[in-house]
Amino acid sequence: MAAIGAALALTAGACSDATAGGFGFPGAAPSLDALGRATLQAVVQGDTARLDGFRLTRQEHNDVVWPELPASAPEVGMPVDLVWADIERRNDRALNRILPALAGRRLDYVGTSCRGGLQAFGSFHVLTDCWVTFDAPDRAGEGPVAVPRFEVQFFKDVLVRDAGYKVFRYYEELPRPAGRSAVP
């Protein structure tokens, strides 16, 4: 985890003159924690416009991110418009599953972690296997029962560019109790 923090500090300090003082893309969060907190808040509020603002736009993806990804190589033959259409389809499906399950709930943000490491590309980095952790006081039982803690992969990958954090797309994973391993 310390290696990821050091790499992110280097990334944040390596802003070009053209983007210095900005967060790489409009709507980017200033930190991973801010992105996780704001995403949870937007999900609870059912605010799809705000959620969309945390995500890469078609132009950001197609003009900046896609050309630096290995899948964009001519020999792979993957058309960017087909890739973007798939991202949109999966994103819509995810929001249609997540929002009904969590909108209007009382959820208290705990933290965001990316457990899969950091991948470096030309002008950006990608944090992988990201989880948002929260407490659900509305699920606590009567008496001195601990408030249940959950984690969810609202997004699995986060693009880091010029000290700004953005989501590639949302995932349709529902929350699970924190600390529980995924079923193989």
Image (cartoon, rainbow, N blue to C red):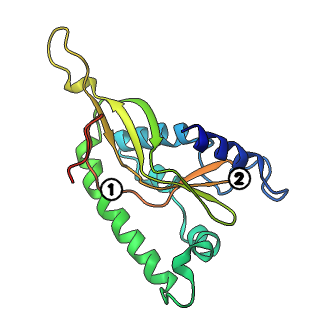
Above or below: residue 72 compared with residue 174: below
Where residue 153 sits: x, y (%)? 36, 48
Image-quadrant location for residue 72: bottom right
In the picture of the structure, the residue carrying the numbered disc 1 is 95
In front: 179, or 33? Answer: 179
In front: 4, or 88? Answer: 4
Alpha carbon separation for disc pair 2 and 1:
27 Å
> Which residue occupies 59% across, 45% down?
29
In the picture of the structure, the residue carrying the numbered disc 2 is 162
Residue at the top extreme of this rendering: 144
Q: Are marks 2 and 1 in contact (CB under 8 Å)?
A: no
Q: Secondary structure at mark 1?
A: helix
Where does the C terminus fall, quadrant-wise?
bottom left
Q: How many marks?
A: 2
Q: Secondary structure at mark 2?
A: loop
> Which residue occupies 26% across, 20% down?
147
Q: Who comes first in sequence, dot 2 or dot 1?
A: 1
Where residue 154 sits: x, y (%)? 37, 49
At label 2, counting other C-alpha atoms closer than 10 Å, the crowd grade (few under 14, some 14-19, many 20 or more) is many
Image position of 88 (left or right of 58): left
